[in-house]
Image: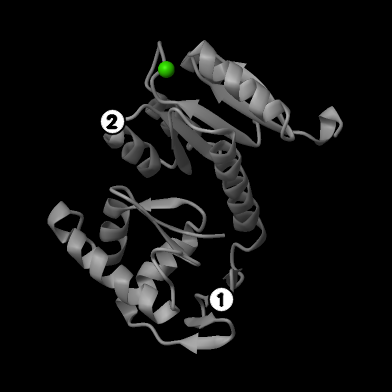
Amino acid sequence: MSETQKIPVLVIEDEPEIRKFLSAALASNGFSPAFALTGREGLAHLQSRVPEILILDLGLPDMDGLDIIKSLRGWSNIPVIVLSARGQEKDKIAALELGADDYLTKPFSTGELLARLKAALRRAQQSVSQASAVFEANGLSFDAQNRIVKVDGGEVRLTPTEFRLLALLVKHAGKIVTHKQLLQDVWGKSSAENNHYLRIYTQHLRQKLGDDPLHPRFIITEPGVGYKLKV
Ligand code: CA
């Protein structure tokens, strides 16, 4: 693969060990990585040459990774994968709510890294090509305008709430939607006690779509964080 065919990715990460690992893993798998060691350096890079995807450490020496997402989302929709340490559950959720696409918890393998990168890039391509068209993936077809949902060509009848829930997952297909985002957008409330609504409706939705939560074809559970529709 020539250098020009490689996918440009920016990594903002201060830990040398992780940079070394990412450099090798990315360069040998079709990516052309650039590195920034601080948030300031990263933002300067993003403003001059926008990569196709950003890998962002949340714990940077000069600023909070969350502030970089906030700033970036003002002018770019490129996929963002955040790197977090174990136990940074709150930061991970905050990052997703600010518009990050996915996360990796350190330490992670090359396989996990590539799977997340590919899913995020696929999602970015789909959202460009089918902004208004019917969503189709893995045998699921979702026509928002005509309110028709089909699985393998057969129509599935959903209640208005189930439909709204699926519509939100479709809108962010390939990306984790947090419990709070789902509760706010579907029910208009966000308190944690309402998490049981979400569990019940997701269970109904899965049953109607014929999805198996243990071997999901459509809806993936991200424990303690939210749900994601596969693309
Ligand atoms: Ca760090």
- Determine whether label 2 and label 1 are within 8 Å by CB: no
- Depth check: 209 or 47 in front? 209
Q: Residue at x 32, y 68 (%)?
A: 202
Amino acid type, label 2:
Gly
Task: Specify the quadrant of the image occupied by residue 78.
Answer: top right
Give x and y (percent) for residue 184: 26, 58
Q: Residue at x 32, y 33 (%)?
A: 91
Task: Specify the quadrant of the image occupied by residue 29.
Answer: top right
Give x and y (percent) for residue 38: 49, 13
Q: Is residue 155 visible?
A: yes
Amino acid type, label 1:
Ser
Give x and y (percent) for residue 80: 52, 37
Numbered disc 2: secondary structure: loop
**In front: label 2 or label 1:** 2
- Depth check: 72 or 36 in front? 36
The image shows residue 105, relative to residue 205, as above or below, that is: above
- In the rendered image, which residue does mark 1 sit on? 141
Q: Quadrant of ligand 1?
A: top left
Say which label, 2 or 1, has the lower sequence index: 2
Disc number at residue 87? Answer: 2
- Depth check: 141 or 49 in front? 141
- Answer with left or right where residue 4 lies relative to residue 33: right
